[in-house]
Image (tube, coloured by chain):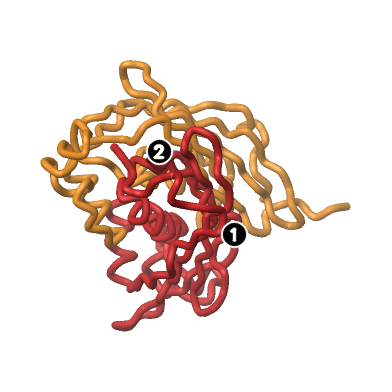
Chain colours: A red, B orange
Amino acid sequence: MTATVGYDDVEVGTELPERLFPLRRVDLVRYAGASGDFNPIHWSERAAADAGLPGVLAHGMLTMATATRLVTDWAGDPGAVLEVGVKFSSPVVVPDGDEGASVSVRGVVEKKLDNNRVVVNLTTRCRGEKVLMAARATVQLS
Amino acid sequence: MSLNQDFVGRSFVSPVPFQVGREHIRQFARAIGDDNPLYHDVEAAKAAGYSDLVAPPTFLISAIPGALGLPTDDPALGLDYALVVHGEQRFTLRRPVVAGDELITTSTLTGIRAVGRNEVLVTTYRYDTSSGEEVAVGACTLVSRGTAPPRG
């Protein structure tokens, strides 16, 4: 397990360019099955409305996984992610349609630690709104 | 109805080890739309120095026995799942989880506190292999909307 990014090649401020990730209803159903989280607010319009929500929501953990992916792809090795933590600040509403929702993720190296570790701060938005706050990953670079 | 404070401090240990399987890792990776070869191709994972397929970092959420990252589904806790939203989540990995790992999760409900009209539940986790190696720790905050007692 070795990251393809070298510690000496990054500085505080090094950017992980923005990427867009589509989330459709079928993705939520697939995530429900794979994760075991079958809360109906993630697939039933009726359940979401009954709970007073604006629509069917993506699982918070799916949004977190999507944000984390920016880091695992950047590092070149998912095993290089030592820590990841987020606060869920706003729900990702996924309309029933071919387009679904689009989640944008970008990152910036916020801190360089000892032992070739860095902290990446992630900005994750949907329809312009920040859906995660304090989203950070600690990554072992080579 | 407010949550049952008697649950604070209780720990729950998964009754049987969670067997991390190749197909589950592949299925989880497909569900997050990630085609990273280390999640799908055993030879690629071995070439990268792993003993088997690597699990995505957030795969750990699926190894917790209760729903929604809660340590228990005991109705005595008084939680209505329809009112719950996820507040925070964190994982710290001592090493990557790989196919073949047998994980035993110890979840501890460390706090239930009222924040306005909501109640915030904090759970911490520890993931050990069945041979006693600590693989990861984590923490989860859930918000139970509108269940805090009104202030008198």
Badge 2 vs badge 1, beta-carbon distance below 8 Å: no
On the image, numbered disc 1 is attached to which residue? Answer: A133
Q: Residue B148: image x %, image y %?
A: 72, 52
Q: Are marks 2 and 1 on the same chain?
A: no
Residue at the spot 41% in from the left edge and 58% down from the top edge: A39
Check the residue under mark 2 and report the chain it is in. Answer: B
Q: What distance separates the C-alpha of mark 2 from that of mark 1?
A: 24 Å
Question: In the image, A49: left or right of A30?
Answer: right
* Residue type, label 2: Ile
Check the residue under mark 1 and report the chain it is in. Answer: A
Residue A68, compared with residue B105, is above or below; it is below
Residue at the spot 56% in from the left edge and 54% down from the top edge: A12
The 10 Å Cα crowd at callout 2, few under 14, some 14 to 19, many 20 or more, is: many
Q: As rendered, which of B55 and B62 lies closer to the eye?
A: B55
Judged from the image, the secondary structure of the residue bearing numbered disc 1 is: strand
Q: Residue B6: image x %, image y %?
A: 65, 31
Q: Residue A133: image x %, image y %?
A: 59, 59
Q: Nearer the viewer, mark 2 or mark 1?
A: 1
Furthest-right residue in view?
Answer: B152
Residue at the spot 33% in from the left edge and 82% down from the top edge: A99
Question: In the image, A67: left or right of A114?
Answer: left
Residue A124, compared with residue B50, is above or below; it is below
Q: As rendered, which of B35 and B3 lies closer to the eye?
A: B35
On the image, numbered disc 2 is attached to which residue? Answer: B64
* Residue type, label 1: Met
Residue B19, compared with residue B41, is above or below; it is above
Judged from the image, the secondary structure of the residue bearing numbered disc 2 is: loop
